[in-house]
Amino acid sequence: MNTVSARPRIDERALGAGTTIRFVMLVLLMLAAGGAMILPVVRTLHAADGVDCLLAAGLDPNRAGDAAAMTRVAAQWIPFWACMDQSAPLPPWWQIAVLPVLLMVAAALLFLLLPAWKIRRRRLVALHTLDTDGSVLRLVEEAAGAAGLARVPRVVVDRAAPTTGAVVFGRNRRPIISLHGGLLACRGTDPGHVRTVLLHELAHIANRDVTVTYGTVALWRAFCTLVLLPYLLWSTFQFSTLAPPTWLATAPYQIRTLLLPLLLVALVHLARADVLRAREIHADLAAARWGADLHRSITAAPSLRKLRPVADSLREQWSTHPQAQVRRSALDDPSPLFGLRPLPILLTGVSAVLIHSHLLTYLGTYRRMSSWISQGAAFVPALLVCGVIGTALWRSVAYAVVTGRPAPSGVRTGLWLGAGLGTGALFIGLGAGASQWWIGGLAGLLLIVAAGTAFAVWVTRCARLWAGTWRGSSLRPALVLCLAAGFVVASVWFTWQTTQGIYGLFWQTAGTTGLRQTVLRMFPGATDTGHPAVAATAVVVPLLLTSLNSPLFTAAAAATWLLPALALALGPTVGRPRWLARARLDGDPSTARWETPPPLRLALVPGLVGGTGCWLAVVGVLAYLHTGQAGPTPGNGIEGLRYLAFTFVALTGTLAVTAMWASRGRHLLVTLIATQTAATLGLAGTVVLMSVDGCASRLSVWNTDCGWRPAWRALPDGNLGAFVNITLLLAALVTLLATPLPAVVSAVLRRQAQPGRAERRRPSRSRPIVRWSALGLPTALVLTLAVAEPLTMAKYQTSLPDYAAGQRTIQQLLGDAPPPTSPQTRARQVRAWYRHGGKYLLGSALAATDQLRTVEVGFDAEQAEYAPELARIRSLCVQLGTLAAWEDGYYFRVPDAETQADWHEFGRFARDGSRKCLSAVDRQPFDANAFIGLASARFDLDVAGSYATSATNSITDILTKAGYQAS
C-alpha cells in the first residue's frame, strides 16, 4: 500500500451515481409483480375450480401444499394438467401479458397529465405575474447559465407555500420550477439564498432527475390502481370464504398472499426514498460547484418529537429528504454517496428475489420452462444485483483509494445482501407448498446468505485489484468488465437457487433410496443400489442434476477467475494510476492508497503444477482401473460410475493440495485462480485420456484398440457436463475453505509478525509477454469448456421438459400407494377420479371384454368365413390396448390402494393381451399357431376384464358407503 497523511476530496460523479439502476429496479418490480399478481385474479373471474383435479390425483385439498403432496402431483403431471385444462383452464396468455403494457400506457398518460394536474391543484401562477421588475427572472437566467442548461426552464409560483424553498417537476425536456411564496418574498432581502435554491433545483434538471422521479410516481399510482387494489380485493375475498380447517392447513400461503401488497408498498417507498435522498445530495454538490452557498442556506427542518433510536432511524429511512446535518457534512465529504448502507442492500436482495419469482410464476404457470428460458428469467435479477450492489461496491472502493481510507472487505455488504435474498426466499417460499413456510431448513437459508456474502466479497476483491492495475483515465471500463462477469455469476446462482428449490420437493420426498435409483438411471446397466460408488454419488445427485439446468454454469466458473487473472496479468501500474487524477477534485494526491497486486506467478505456478498433478492423478486412476481387456459399454453401468467417482476423488485431492499451496499468500483471488487453473487443466486431461482410451495398453479401461472416441459421446447424455460442473464448483469451494487456513494455522501456532514490520511482496520481474503466455493455455481451455458445454447440451437445455419421462421417474420412486387420509376424503378422491374419466375407462373396458367373449372364430374353414369376426376382434383388441395406455400414466392412478392394484393389473393384462391379439389376427394365413396365439390373448384380455370388474365393484362400494351415487 502507498500512504501519506492528507485526504483529497473525491468527485461524486466517479463511476456514475448508481441511482438510475435503482429506479429501473422499481419499474421492473412493479411490471413483473403486475403479471404475476393479476394471474390469480383473472383465473377467479374465469370461474375456475381445480379442486376435483387435486382430489383425483389423490391429494387432500386441506393438505395440498406440503412436499409429499406436490410431488404426488408431479408423479401424475400429464393427467393433472389435462384435468386442469378442462376443469380450470388458464386464461389466454395475452390477458396476463397485456397488463404490463396497460400499466406502462396508464403510467405514461398519468405522467403527461401530472404537471397540469399539479399546477391546477396548487393553483400555481406564472412568474411574470408576480415578478414585475424581472429581478427573479434574471436570477433564474443567470443560474441556468451557471448550470450549463441550453434553455431556461419554465418558472411558476406557489403563493400558498410560506416556506423559502422550491421544487421541480414535469420531465427532463420540459421541466417546471415551482418557487414557494416565501422564497419570492425574500428576493430583495436575501438574493443569495434565492440563487442557491435555484441552483439546487437546476442541478436536478442537469442531472436528469425529473423524468425518472415523476415517471416512477406515475407508474406506482397506476400499479396501485390496476394491480394492487384488485389484488387486495381478491385476496380479502378469498380469505373470507375459506373454511377454518382449510385456512389453518394453508396458513403460510394465505399469510404470504395478504402480506404481499404490504411488502410491495414498503419496498417501493423505502427504495424510492433512499434514491431521492441520494439525488438530493448529488444536487447539493452540483450546486456547490456552481457557486451556491449551501452551508448558509440549508436549514434544519422543524424538530420532531424524539423517539427511540430504532424508530428515529426508521423515520429517517422513510423520509424522501436527507437530514440537514447529513447534507451539510456531504458538502465537505461526500461519503454518504459512497457508503454501503444496509437498507438499500437489503431491499435490493428482496426485490431481486421477488422479481425473479414473479417472472417464474408466469412462465411456470404456462409450462414454458426450458433451461435457457429459466436462465433468461434469471438475467433480470442478476442485472439488478450487479447494477446496484456491484456499482456501490466499486464506488466504495474508489472512494477508499482516493481518500486513503481502509478499503471495504465486502463481508458486511454481502451479509446484508444474503439477508435480503434469504428474506425474499422465505417470503415467496421458494418451492414450498401452500402449507409450508420453507423447505430448505436452516442450512438452506445459511447457504443463501453465504452465497450473497461470497458474491460481494468477490466483487470487492476484484475492484480493489483492478483499482491498482488499471491504466486508463477512467475506471468505468474496468467496472463494466467486472459487472459483466458478475452478471453471469449471479444469473447462474439465481437459476440454480430456483431449480434447487423446485427439485428440493422431489429430493425431500424421494429420500436415500430414490436418490440411489436416480444414480442407476444415470448409468444404464448398473443395478446394485448398495454399491459404494452408487451410495457416494447419491449424496451429490441434486447438485449434479441442478448444475445442468444452467447453460452458463461453466461460463460463470470461468468468469470468477479470469477477471482477476487478467488484472494480475496487467501487473502493477508505474506510479500513481491515471484514473485517480480524474476522480480527485482537490486535496493532496499523495494521500491516495491502492493495493499493489500480487505477482501472477503466485497463482499460475501452483495452478499449472496442480493441473499437471491432476493429469498424473487421473493416470493413476486409469492404471488402477485397468483390466487388460475390453469392458462394458463405455460410460455405462457400475464401471462407468466407478470411473467418474475415482476420477473425481483424485481431482479433489489434487485441488485441495493446490489450494493449500496457493493460499500461503492469504489472497482469496490468487487461490481461486490457482485452483480453477488446476481444475481446468485436470478436466482437459480427463477428457483427453477418456477419448483415447485403449491407446495406452496399461491405461485402457474400456477399449483394447487405439482410436479417438470423444468423451462426450462415450458417456450418457449429461454425465460429462455434470462432472465438469461439479469439479469447477468444487474448486471454488476448496478456495473458500483453504484461503483462511494459513491465518488459522498461524493463530493456533501463535506465530505473529514482529512489531513494526509489514508484510512485503516481492515485485514481479516477469515480462508482460511471459505473464500473458502463461495465462493463455488455461484461458483457452476454460473458454473452450464454457462454449462447448452449452453447445453439446443444446438439445437438452433448449427443449421443454419431458413431462412423461419425469412422471415415470417419480412414479417409480414413490410407488403406487397413495398417502394416508381420512375415509371421507378418500371417498371424495375416488369420486373425483371416477367422475373425471374413471367411469368412462372402466365402463369401456367392461363393455369391450364382454363383447370379446361373444365373438367366436375358428381356423379350419376358409379364412374369408371368419374375416368379419377377426376384424371385430381386432377392433376390440385395439380399444383395450388404448384403454391400457390410459392406465400407463395418461390418467390418474386410483386414490384407493386396493382399487389401484386392480386397475394396474387390468392395464398390464390388457397391454399384453392386446399386443398378442394384434399379432395373431394380423398373421397370414390364420393357421393353428395364430389361433393358439389368439386364444392366449383372449385369455389375458378376459383376466383384464375381471380386474376391471373388481375395480368397478370396489369403487361402487366406496362411493355407496360415503353416500355418493356410483352411476
Image: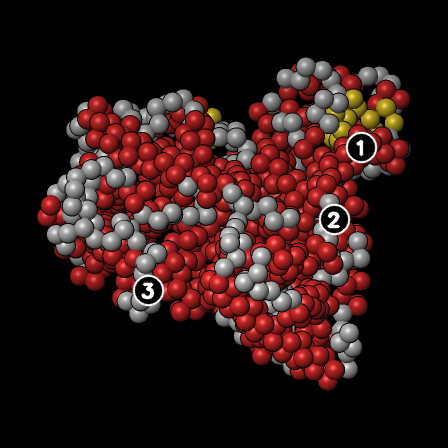
Q: Earlier in the sequence, mark 1 or mark 2?
A: 2
In the orientation shown, which residue stands out farthest toward the bottom?
961
| Label 1 SS | helix
Mark 3 neighbour density, 10 Å: few (under 14) some (14–19) many (20 or more): some
Residue 903 placement, left or right of 724: right
| Residue density around tag 2, few if under 14, some if 14–19, many if 20 or more, within 10 Å | some
Residue 607 image point, x, y percent: 21, 41
**Which circle's residue, 3 or 2, is located before the other in the chain?**
2
Residue identifier under label 1: 109
Task: Using the numbered discs, state the Cα–Cα distance from disc 1 to disc 2 in whole angstroms.
Answer: 27 Å
Q: Amino acid at mark 2?
A: Pro
Residue hosting label 3: 527
**Residue 698 locus on image (x, y percent):** 10, 48
Q: Are marks 3 and 2 in contact (CB under 8 Å)?
A: no
Work out whether residue 316 or residue 520 is closer to the camera in this orientation and state it.
520
Report the quarter where the C terminus lies: bottom right
Residue 574 visible at all: yes
Residue named by callout 2: 91
- CA gap between label 3 and label 2 equals 46 Å
